[in-house]
Amino acid sequence: MNEAVATLDGWYTYHDFRTLNWPAWRAAKPSVRQEAVAQLLAFAEKNNQVQRNRQGAYGQYAIAGHKADLMFMHMRPTLAELNQVKTEFQKTRFADYTISNYSYISCVELSSYLAKPGVNVDEDPYLQSRLKPVLPDTQSVCFYPMNKRRAGADNWYMLSMKERQEMMKSHGMIGRKYGDVVTQLITGSQGLDDWEWGVTLFADEPLMFKKLVYEMRFDEVSARFAEFGAFYVGTRLSGSQMHTYLQV
Ligand code: 76R
């Protein structure tokens, strides 16, 4: 068997994409809308508190284009907790006006391709902050799932550890050029969802997503081996922005 890469695994992650049923929302009685918004804001506040307590992470975003209206992003130490979060949301009156058209389940993953040996993971503050992150409060977010190709001569999983390591080095170098303007969060989803990884990128300026992803396409890891699912891009919503967003 080929040598598998060791991974460090952090919090479970739930990207929850929702489309708002605008006609139903507009037609709802103002008192019902008010109750729905209040319940949604309370849900958000509870999740923000979880993030402040470092027991999980939370972000809410308005998604551009037709694929979804909103994305709620949750992180928790266990899958059971993520399921509780989902159920809690479903029980809000607000959820009655949403359609769940996409979601993604994964788990924070740091691969060891470029890791320094001999680090004590549990006591390394940098690694801990990446495995159990606070979501960056940038203006924009980008999410897409991806695989590494397994086809004929282009089978990532049949390459030697050394070959993969070298390619990941080049990948990391390109990524690092954008380190100041884009924060990347790689979550692994082998055995958890339909693709192998979720890629969540955070930046103030969405053009940086385009520049980074485009430049990476020319790098061998992406050019030869990456296969991508649908891309979602959007902007962060504070509590008051969510309030405004839902006003009709
Ligand atoms: O963890 C680290 O930051 C160390 C270097 C590094 C690893 C191991 C790194 C850096 N990545 C790693 C792993 Mn990445 N990354 C992607 C995408 O669109 C595409 O072409 C691919 C999607 C982007 C945009 C991106 C950005 N990375 C991975 C893995 C796991 C691979 C495996 O285990 O086989 C995937 C799937 C993946 C995909 N990467 C960086 C970035 C950026 C911006 C960095 C630099 C981070 C920084 O130094 O600040």
Image (spheres, helix red, strand yellow):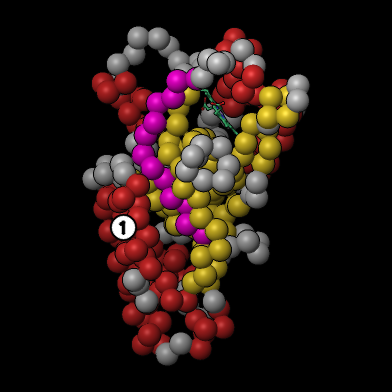
Q: Quadrant of residue 169?
A: top right
- Can residue 231 be seen from the camera position used here? yes
Q: Nearer the viewer, residue 147 or 36?
A: 147
The percent coordinates of residue 98 (x first, y second) are 49, 72
Q: Residues within 10 Å of mark 1 (few under 14, many from 20)?
A: few
The percent coordinates of residue 136 (x first, y second) are 43, 42
Quadrant location of the N terminus? Answer: top right
Residue 104 lies left or right of residue 134; in this view the side is right
Q: Main secondary structure of the magenta part?
A: strand
The percent coordinates of residue 95 (x first, y second) are 42, 72
Q: Residue at 40% of width from left, 74% of height from top?
A: 94
The percent coordinates of residue 50 (x first, y second) are 27, 50
Q: Residue furthest front?
A: 1
**Residue of label 1:** 84
Image position of 164 with respect to 146: above or below: above
Q: Residue at 31% of width from left, 57% of height from top?
A: 84
Q: Residue at 59% of width from left, 30% of height from top?
A: 178
Q: Quadrant of residue 119?
A: top left
Image position of 68 with respect to 37: above or below: above
Question: Magenta stretch?
Answer: 5-17
Q: Residue furthest left?
A: 53
Kind of residue at disc 1: Gln
Helix or strand or loop: what does disc 1 sit on? helix
- Can residue 139 be seen from the camera position used here? no
